[in-house]
């Protein structure tokens, strides 16, 4: 069994919405046979994994994209089920799985959900080893594999405190992003984001946290506002500790002045030996030691969030109860078998410990670990009641007296904490502290929430929800407007225009596209940034108030979307497709299924903006989770007309203007002559790009005034849409620079040329080497049917092909055309551009297909501003249909 590739799908993807691994698995030899034909295999699997459900019906794969579901008795299907089972056994319950057959015999896509990526990856490898052993009859230590996964999961997953807050945010629909391997988590997007670190928020005062760590300073501040605290003072030696203890009166508490989680704290000390030993233990945790008067009563923890107490628990020190038969050591071992007790904070309780402190406490009671306490005798293992040292907690939230709650909120405020765990010692939490000599002994920043989430007894409290409520008001999901744009052609122009509209509305816009990442108009990254990592970078930026994200199919296949859902998904078109034959996408139907992932993840309150004239795009409406707005160049377009007849929304062009329509209502929005990008409506594909953008703006609620102003100030110049129908003049000729690099783009350009006056047509052209042969030939054929002269080149666009291979395919395509009479071949994009420009003459219409957009546009600008036009006559066209090919010395081939 060979696992060829493994991808982590971290956002919504073609298979579903949960995080998942997608593995390409190849089965050969014995492993390719059905499970039923492998002697003893099913028996071994049932022995090793009793919870494995092999009889489950195969879950349908994403047949829109890849092949049909793998048979249920295929080892590939079983592999996916084992991956899920191992994770669940390790304490990370998952259920989502898909298995699809691929075109190559014996190969499959196996998709398995994960909660923690590395746990999923390790489970996949363990499943492969397990199945290999099961098929061959070898042994496999399932328990060891599961325990390894369990430890890994507990080590890397969020702890219960952070996890409860994160889950509460998820339940409210707030986006979540873990920022490190610890507990730093971002909620929300852009300017609406908030952050937490365990039970601290971005509003937790660093000064307040520092004060809380200094227990003596905390007491001083609390005492100054009338909050009851125990008498005590710092000491510098063990002898001084005993002296102070005698002065304030026994029993006493000895603890570090700076500390947390109860480390080094000893309570109810009545003898010199106890105080001296406690001082030594406290010194191991810090150099500054406090001695305080011991307050009788129970140990309570009250959780203050914002301006109220949201939970309270009474804590009991770690202890065991004698049965008259077993030793204390045996009783502790039995207690530690409780699955709620773990070595870290991932479990609701901590293990009981017989360490040096525990042995000392036993000795005070006259016991050793080997002692057998009488039936019913409580044996205390620690004097403090912290959960981190093995204590237990009982919820008492409903019993807290209002006056006690008021003192807790006051204590948190005077220290300066928005979230605080306040430790109280009193006899009855249902009575005011002053009536019973109760005291506040500590105020803690970043309090642990375990005791409130999973109390040993009593009702769990929704503390995560309470913390999230302080970050976001009811109904606030911490989101900024997000528009995602995909399609075959027009994506970048539509993305840039949409960003311009939002900027005009007053928003600071984050934008990703094939040219880079832009924050409020400033480019912070270059290159093709249309994938999920770039999208996440925009949503991470606290400056961003709205996001427009070009979303390419490669990123969707590679990692999924960079967001959980969008307000608007624009699909410009699918047409004949592009990049076919790559990443297992061979047909336009498969391509449409991939790009339709955006439509499937539109917010219920949002909209999908779809090209009504493109059948595969229009069909995506059935998959939309929100509303649908169709756009088309003509109101009579059948899909649009039917949608409007049903009361839907649509945007179209008519009588030289753009219209908004809902049902039978029509609103004339703007004249096309006032939309420079469309060149008075003559450039059809730009009209479509504008229609799509206007529809998205409508869905977002932008006012018509803002839309008109934005359209009027977006002319499609090289600084606004570089290489997207950029128009310049030179020597009486019209130059069109465009990135169009597929058949649909060329056809759209040629349609636009038909509305522009000219005498001859020339093209500077190449084809990307990573396209299929048939696609390169098709592009050349289109050029040959629409242009008189072409300068073709090879350069960085070879993309893995040998020199001359692209040009050879272009020649084949040119031979199929009827108009092209002259072809010149060049080496290098700028050389080809120069050769073409030196031979233009007035009235020419020249298409320059820019591959290296920025450098080529800069070269063209320098050339036309510095060179003196000196056009030369072209050769007299020959009557043959096959174009003449002239190859200068620098030519390839």
Image (spheres, helix red, strand yellow):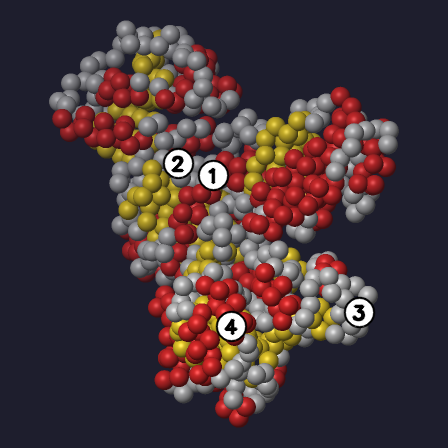
Residue at position x 27%, y 21% in the image: 830
Q: Closer to us: mark 1 or mark 2? A: 2
Mark closest to the chain's N terminus, 2 or 3 = 3
Q: Which mark is residue 552?
A: 1
Q: Is residue 883 above or below residue 833?
A: above
Circle 3 Cα neighbour tier, 10 Å, few/some/many (<14 / 14–19 / ≥20): some
Q: Position of residue 532 (x, y in %)?
A: 47, 43
Spatial separation of the CA atoms under disc 3 and disc 1 = 68 Å
Residue 510 visible within the image: yes
- Evaluate if marks 3 and 1 touch, with contact meaning CB atoms under 8 Å apart: no
- Evaluate if marks 2 and 4 touch, with contact meaning CB atoms under 8 Å apart: no
Mark closest to the chain's N terminus, 3 or 1 = 3
Spatial separation of the CA atoms under disc 2 and disc 4 = 67 Å
Q: Is residue 167 above or below residue 865?
A: below
The residue labelled by disc 3 is 323
Q: Closer to us: mark 2 or mark 3? A: 3
Spatial separation of the CA atoms under disc 2 and disc 3 = 71 Å
């Amino acid at each position: 069994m060979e696992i060829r590739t493994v991808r982590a799908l971290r956002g919504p993807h073609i298979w579903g919405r949960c995080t998942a691994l997608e593995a390409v698995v190849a089965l050969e030899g014995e492993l390719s046979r059905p499970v039923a034909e492998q002697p003893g295999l099913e028996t071994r699997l049932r022995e090793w994994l009793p919870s494995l459900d092999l009889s489950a019906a195969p879950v349908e794969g994403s047949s829109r994209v890849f092949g049909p579901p793998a048979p249920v008795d295929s080892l590939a299907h079983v592999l996916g089920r084992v991956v899920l089972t191992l994770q669940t056994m390790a304490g990370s319950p998952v259920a989502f799985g898909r298995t699809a057959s691929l075109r190559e015999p014996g190969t499959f896509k196996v998709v398995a959900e994960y909660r923690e990526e590395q746990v999923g990856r390790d489970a996949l490898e363990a499943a492969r080893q397990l199945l290999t052993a099961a098929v061959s009859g070898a042994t496999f230590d399932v328990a060891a594999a599961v325990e390894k996964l369990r430890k890994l999961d507990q080590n890397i997953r969020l702890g219960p405190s952070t996890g409860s807050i994160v889950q509460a945010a998820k339940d409210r629909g707030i986006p979540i992003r873990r920022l490190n391997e610890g507990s730093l988590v971002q909620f929300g997007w852009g300017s609406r984001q908030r952050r937490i670190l365990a039970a601290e928020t971005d509003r937790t005062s660093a000064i307040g946290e520092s004060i809380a760590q200094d227990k003596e300073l905390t007491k001083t501040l609390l005492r100054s506002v009338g909050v009851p605290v125990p008498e005590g003072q710092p000491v510098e030696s063990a002898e001084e500790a005993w002296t102070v203890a005698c002065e304030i009166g026994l029993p006493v508490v000895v603890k570090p002045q700076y500390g947390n989680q109860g480390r080094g704290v000893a309570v109810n000390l009545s003898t010199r030996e106890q105080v001296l030993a406690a001082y030594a233990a406290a010194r191991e945790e810090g150099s500054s030691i406090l001695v305080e008067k011991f307050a009788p009563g129970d140990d309570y923890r009250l959780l203050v969030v914002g301006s109220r107490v949201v939970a309270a628990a009474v804590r009991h020190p770690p202890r065991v109860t004698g049965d008259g038969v077993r030793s204390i050591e045996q009783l502790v071992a039995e207690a530690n078998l409780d699955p709620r007790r773990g070595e870290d904070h991932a479990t609701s309780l901590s293990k009981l410990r017989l360490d040096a402190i525990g042995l000392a406490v036993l000795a005070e009671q006259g016991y050793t670990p080997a002692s057998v306490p009488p039936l019913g005798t409580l044996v205390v293992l620690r004097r403090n009641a912290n959960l981190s040292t093995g204590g237990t907690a009982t919820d008492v939230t409903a019993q807290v007296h209002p006056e006690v709650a008021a003192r807790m909120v006051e204590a948190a405020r005077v220290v300066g904490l928005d979230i605080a765990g306040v430790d109280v010692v009193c006899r009855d939490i249902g009575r005011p502290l002053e009536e019973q000599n109760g005291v506040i002994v500590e105020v803690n920043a970043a309090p642990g929430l375990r005791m409130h989430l999973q109390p040993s007894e009593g009702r769990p409290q929704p503390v995560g929800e309470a913390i999230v409520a302080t970050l976001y008001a009811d109904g606030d999901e911490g989101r900024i407007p997000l528009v995602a744009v995909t399609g075959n052609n027009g994506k970048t122009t539509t993305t840039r225009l949409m960003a311009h509209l939002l900027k005009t509305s007053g928003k600071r816009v984050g934008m990703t596209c094939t040219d880079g990442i832009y924050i409020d108009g400033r480019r912070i990254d270059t290159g093709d940034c249309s994938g999920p990592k770039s999208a996440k970078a925009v949503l991470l930026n606290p400056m961003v108030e709205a996001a427009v994200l070009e979303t390419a199919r490669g990123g969707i296949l590679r990692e999924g979307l960079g967001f959980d859902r969008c307000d608007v998904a624009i699909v410009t078109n699918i047409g004949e497709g592009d990049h076919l034959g790559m990443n297992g996408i061979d047909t336009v139907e498969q391509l449409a299924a991939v790009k339709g992932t955006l439509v499937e993840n539109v917010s219920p309150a949002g909209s999908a903006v779809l090209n009504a004239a493109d059948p595969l795009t229009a069909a995506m409406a059935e998959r939309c989770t929100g509303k649908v707005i169709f756009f088309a160049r003509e109101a009579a377009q059948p899909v649009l007309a039917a949608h409007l007849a049903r009361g839907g929304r649509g945007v179209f062009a008519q009588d030289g203007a753009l219209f908004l329509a809902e049902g039978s209502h029509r609103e004339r929005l703007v004249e096309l002559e006032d939309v420079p990008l469309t060149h008075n409506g003559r450039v059809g594909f730009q009209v479509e790009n504008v229609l799509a953008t206007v529809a998205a703006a409508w869905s977002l609620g932008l006012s018509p005034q803002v839309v008109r102003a934005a359209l009027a100030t977006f002319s499609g110049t090289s600084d606004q849409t570089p290489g997207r129908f950029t128009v310049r003049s030179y020597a009486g000729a019209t130059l069109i620079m465009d990135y169009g690099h597929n058949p649909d783009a060329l056809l759209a350009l040629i349609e636009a040329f038909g509305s522009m006056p000219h005498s001859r047509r020339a093209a500077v052209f190449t084809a990307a080497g990573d396209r299929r042969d048939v696609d390169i030939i098709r592009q050349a054929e289109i050029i040959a049917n629409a242009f008189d002269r072409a300068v073709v080149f090879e350069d960085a666009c070879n993309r893995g092909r040998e020199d001359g291979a692209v040009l050879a395919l272009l020649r084949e395509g040119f031979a199929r055309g009827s108009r092209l009479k002259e072809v010149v071949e060049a080496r290098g994009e700028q050389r080809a551009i120069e050769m073409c420009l030196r031979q233009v003459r007035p009235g020419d219409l020249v298409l320059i297909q820019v591959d290296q957009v920025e450098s080529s546009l800069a070269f063209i600008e320098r050339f036309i501003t510095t060179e003196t036009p000196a056009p030369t006559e072209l050769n007299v066209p020959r009557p043959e249909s096959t174009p003449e090919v002239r190859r200068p010395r620098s030519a390839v081939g």
